[in-house]
Amino acid sequence: ANQQPGSKPWMNDDIPVTDGSVILFGHKLDGTLCQELVKRVPAFIYCLIADQNVYGIFGEKFVSKFKETGKTLHVKIVPPGETTKSRKIKEEIEDFMLENKMNRDTCCIALGGGVVGDLTGYVASTFMRGVPFVQIPTTLLSMVDASVGGKTAINVPMGKNLIGAFHQPTVVFMDMGFLDGFSQREPVRAEREFRAGIAEIIKTGAIWDAELFEVCERRVEQIQAREHEVLNEIVRRSVVIKADVVRQDPRESGLRGILNWGHTIGHAVEGLCGMADYNEGLLHGECVAIGMVLESNLARALGLLSATDVGRIVRCIEAYKLPTKIPADLRIDPIMSKMMGDKKNTEGRLKCVLLDRIGHCYEPKASLVDAEIVRMICSPCITPVPTGPLSGKVRVPGSKSVSNRVLPLAVMGKGDCLVRGLLLSDDTQRCMEALAQLHPLGDEAYEWTEGGAALKVKGCDGKLRVPAQELYLGNSGTSARFLSAIATVVEQAGGSIVVTGNKRMKERPIKDLVDALREHGLKVDYLEGEGCPPIRIHSNGLPGGTLSMSAQISSQYVSGVLLAAPLAKTALSLQLKEDKPISEPYIEMTIGMMKSFGVEVSRPQGNRYDIPKKGYVNPAVFEVEADASAATYPLAIAAITGGTVTCEAVGSGSVQGDAKFAFLLEKMGCTVKQDENGTTVTGPAAGTLKSPGEINMEEMTDAFMTAAVLAAVAKGTTRIRGVANQRVKECNRILVMVQELGKCGVVARELEDGLEIEGAAGVAGLQGAVIACHDDHRIAMSFGVLGCLLPGLVITEKECVEKTYPEYWDHLRLRLGARLAPALSHPSDSAGDASVAAGHVVLIGMRGAGKTTLGRELARRLGRPFQDLDAVLEQRAGVPIPRFVADKGWPAFRELEKTILEEVLKGGAGSEVKVVACGGGVVETPACREMLKASAANGHVVVHIERDIEDIEYLLTSDPSRPPLPEPPSAVWARREALYRECSRLDFYAAPDGWPACAPTSAAAAA
């Protein structure tokens, strides 16, 4: 266990660090600070170092107060920004000090943020072989990070903080009053820097002190409002923890490494897009926030950290409007290069701090982690690698449908409710955040208990408030529809509530609900496009009586009104305009859960619901059952690969319609066993699934995409009906499934209420593809299933599964034994049709271009065997190639080469797929050129590997193991260049040292 500091040591004004260094609270700039400084650090001359911005705010006051001490003070002003941490500026400061006759009886004073603190400390560590220095941090981040611990450094072109020293400040003066100066003069910059500092405090709580993390988690409003009591507590607690760690490990030989949680990835991001000034780029704390999210995902991927804890960390970081994703314009190769070059990494592996729960690290130091899994975490895309039957046991997360209903019920109810098994995903996080804005207690309405396994919700007894901000719900359609209805019960003169979301949310329909509310007398405005969010609901309360509504597009409109109805001014009846609503099982789920919270809905006829005016009463405990929709994916993996998978806690007792999906698998040839507590599916041999014919999936619409990918490899034609409403979900799911299956070679077409798929009876004749997920979790997970059988699928936007099944990829790898690989490049770096081949990847190019080296690495990444045709030829001939050519001549060599190429390429996509490197002159033979050009019909992709001809000439003329060419390499290249391009689908430029790793030369690759 972490060694926690003593009881409330943060209440002390003096906090010892190490080597006599001390942190002092309570000395203000306009009070005793300067007097205390010269008393604590006596010197003959003092040198104040500050940047232009800080000096403009605090400089004159500091100089004025310092004069009262009677001591000599020199001032050196430096430019603001990260670029100031350089050899050049350090040299300027040192020259300034020497010119002013400073000697060993000098004290340096750093007034500013982390840049000035690091720079001043490094100057002090080397000037006259070391002089004392004092830190006066003026930003929250420098208070809780840079000023504590004595790490000083400058940046160089190779990376951040690579040249520096450990040099403890003699005294650090901390005063929250410094934060107010920037807030008044530069509010935008000050706000960003404040949030960056909060990221560091969240980090400290996450690695060491769960109570500190919970304060950050629950008191967001007070912290963002800069309430001094809570701000003083979290800063002091964070500083005490860091000081305690530094005392135990002053030189970062072990324990102190845990302070770098989030920094392995964060520093790489910062090195590529960190702020050179304060107008663009990301701040250090913002980059660390991104790193904390990704390194939390890394710990989850290694089976160490629960999905609930990862969700809490993400939600806490997002609550302070900090970034959580790598910027879209960054590429994975430069990120990995930066990480591998970081000073914290050794032995060719990456040092990462790993959490096993909030407040505790897996090891009391940074752990060595395989770089490949870090690459997979950071990559926006992922590639499943087929390996045969997959089997195992999985407990999927809590039901999204149940979670999104229990949260508003518990918030609106009376009393406390302990919710166990809650899904903590992007969808439910958005719901929680919005409900906290409506709750009088804000984030304090929630408290995580039982080690993060349960959420205690403090009900507000229906007394919802008008929020200070709009309710932003991302792409969570369920939350948007529920909360649009629930917002109508809020009553406040002149108040209103805005419900909005991301770009896709603003395209999703909400017209039927708005029309019904308007007809019922409520004032609701569209703020952008007619019929879609964002909408403004005026806070006049929800009248009782009869509310009439259409329910053909979404059952969520019905559930939203039902959830709100008990808080109407009088009893309310909901009359549907149709005889029967769509997706009725979800409405039944809502009614059943309302009953658990004390409200009974009567249904005098099939399309009418009567709801009494009666407040909800929270049950003491509510158990969220596992998500039946999520369970369809691991069960489908058993079906498609011929394995056996058990999904625990999703059985015959489920209230969710998707629990019946297993019996669809039975129709397709699977063996199914289901009891009240679980479902087990055993698939037939891979490639032998049967079409279920025509199926109506109205009662399990969310599962239709899972069924569609199985139908794609089944024998026979499948028609999926009853899912018309899926056109208005996260994307037009019917259209997208037809398009993306079509990329793989599957014949599919849209129907009025579904789609028709001509099964391929396996994957022979199909091909890999880059799958556009449209930020839709169910598209990504469905094609993840298909990728377990079909080679070469690249799933883009892999993180969109966070919406409902955050640990999906982890479960595939850890629970079912699937092999996953990071995609080799960013999706936009490839041509629209340049997917990974379902057949061989065939490399051609000049001798010496690097085909063998690149081919071996590509084969390793794709999980395929590598075959060098020159090596096959030598084995067939029984002699090395130079001897063969010398004995039998080039024509005999070309004839044997043609024979071997023909044998390799005649295999289709269903045979063992490889990465194949051809000899440099293969394109000299017309028959070989025709074979290469025609190879796409069998699913092969031919890639031309190109390298500077000057490099090739040097290599070939200096390597005696290669047979001499009958003419200079430049002449050969002049003849072959057009032939290589004629035969290849893609060009790959093998860059020399110091160049980017990949510089595509063809229009297709550049696209």
Image (tube, rainbow, N blue to C red):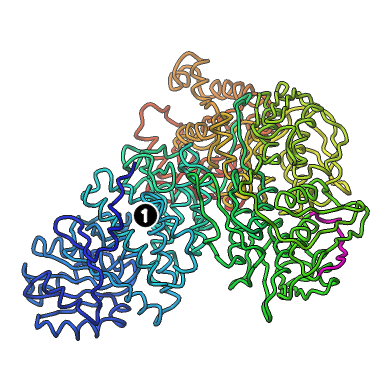
The residue furthest top is: 878
State yes or no: residue 554 in magenta.
yes
Indicate the quadrant where residue 834 lies: top right
Whether residue 930 is visible, yes or no, is no
Q: In this view, does 648 lie above or below 485?
A: above
State yes or no: residue 861 in magenta.
no
* Image coordinates for residue 864, horizontal then vertical, percent: 55, 28
Q: In this view, does 592 lie above or below 863?
A: below
Apparent side of residue 56 relative to residue 222 in the rendered image (left or right): left
Q: How many labels does the image show?
A: 1
Of residues 154 and 518, which is closer to you in this image?
A: 518
Indicate the quadrant where residue 812 lies: top right
Of residues 557 and 654, which is closer to you in this image?
A: 654
The residue type indicated by label 1 comes to: Thr
Q: Residues within 10 Å of mark 1 (few under 14, many from 20)?
A: many
Q: Which residue is drawn at 77% across and 26% down?
A: 689
Q: Which residue is drawn at 72% across and 53% down?
A: 598
Apparent side of residue 478 relative to residue 122 in the rendered image (left or right): right
Q: Quadrant of the N terminus?
A: top left
The residue tagged with tag 1: helix, strand or loop?
helix
* Image coordinates for residue 883, horizontal then vertical, percent: 43, 18
Q: Residue at x 31, y 82 (%)?
A: 57
Q: Is residue 815 above or below residue 593?
A: above
Apparent side of residue 813 relative to residue 527 in the rendered image (left or right): left
Q: Mark 1 points at which residue?
A: 204
* Image coordinates for residue 904, horizontal then vertical, percent: 62, 24
Q: Which contiguous range is marked in magenta?
A: 544-555
* Image coordinates for residue 222, horizontal then vertical, percent: 46, 69
